Image (spheres, rainbow, N blue to C red):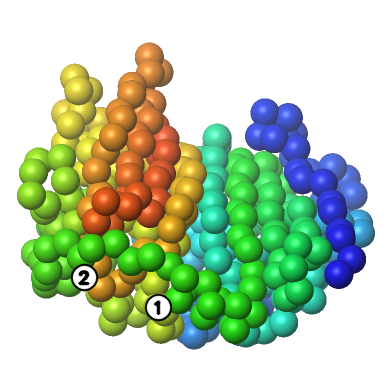
Amino acid sequence: MMRQRTSATASPLTATSAFSAGVVASTQALHYAQAIPRTLVHRASVAEVFLTDAAADGPDRLLVAAQWPRDHALYHPDADGTSDPLLFAESIRQTLLYVGHGRLGIPLGHRFVGQNTGFRIWDREPLRVKGAPVPVVLETTWDYDGSRAPKRYDVRLETALSVDGVRCGHGHIEACVVDERRYQLLRRRVERPTSGPSGQSGAPRLMPHRVGRLRAKDCVLAPGGSPDEWWLRLDLNHAILFDHPTDHIPQAVMLEGFRQLGHLYVHERGQGAPDDTLYGLVGARVDCLAFGELDIPTRLSVTRAESANDGTRELVISAVQGERRIAEAVLNWAPAPVAARAAEPVLQLV
């Protein structure tokens, strides 16, 4: 196959505070009236499709429109009144699939195997939830290689996040893409680790407010065998986290587990931070090292925690099945204004 390469976007440090005049003109043509077809982003529920439109901005760049809801069962606003940052992560994932099928010609039915993903938000104010859904634009470029083997593609996508022309974040995602036959061969070659303790799905959840969620069924953490160990509690019937059947733990579910453990850690192990300090997730990177099996318990643990003079905190969290490390995350948290505490939910829904 022919080899195609395109350059990535600028790093967050060099990103300007607003779009160029040409990009602004292109964004004016974007529409938010309805979601794109759900099959293009591998979603079963139309309600979980956030992308609404796309427009080319040159031969190797795409402007993607997404509408983030004012509220959402799982991705509800943070305590400081800004959009849940994992809406950005999910929009990046959907953009990868949309670009793969719509721009690169990858056939529907191919499997996207996530390798790593991440985002950084340096300005939360444009993401503040007000009286209407948040209209965002993802300025997207990609690095694509379709030459490695027949019917295999490697794609890395970079995107800059903007609201009303103001850039406020940057993200990326990387995946290899294979057809169904090669995917099944790949899965059969996976060496499964020895199963750990049983009862993962039936383990008691933590109270949702401890992990920053509103509903008990959205909590994916259960206590482990020690104070520093937690189980990833899977509910295959969860309408959002398991939107459609799968044979392994989705990358988005793993990210949710990392986020919840991070929230628990920074708020309950403040290391001298004031009791009223609230933290918001402003950055994450997840490296997927192996398939996460659904029927083998997954242990989560914080392997490193650091605090900076400006109050930000960085955590490294590992996910392990048996003795195999299947994923690792680096999470960055920043303190929110004390006044944001008034925005915290006072009722815990079940």
Identify which amino acid the numbered label 1 is placed on.
Answer: Asp
Identify which amino acid the numbered label 2 is placed on.
Answer: Lys
Asked if residue 193 is positioned above or below residue 274 in the image, the reply reads below
Q: In the figure, residue 271 lies in which quadrant?
A: top left
**Location of residue 203 in the rendering, given as x and y in whole percent from the top left corner:** 10, 66
Q: Is residue 55 left or right of residue 269?
A: right
Q: Residue at image x 87%, y 60%?
A: 3
Q: In the figure, residue 297 lies in which quadrant?
A: bottom left
Which residue has dot 1 on it?
247
**Location of residue 106 in the rendering, given as x and y in whole percent from the top left corner:** 74, 76
Q: Residue at image x 61%, y 60%?
A: 175
**Location of residue 46 in the rendering, given as x and y in whole percent from the top left corner:** 52, 83
Is any atom of residue 276 visible in this view? Answer: yes
Q: Residue at image x 59%, y 83%?
A: 180
Structural crowding at the residue carrying mark 2, measured as other residues with C-alpha within 10 Å and reported as few (<14), some (14–19) or many (≥20):
some
Which residue has dot 2 on it?
217
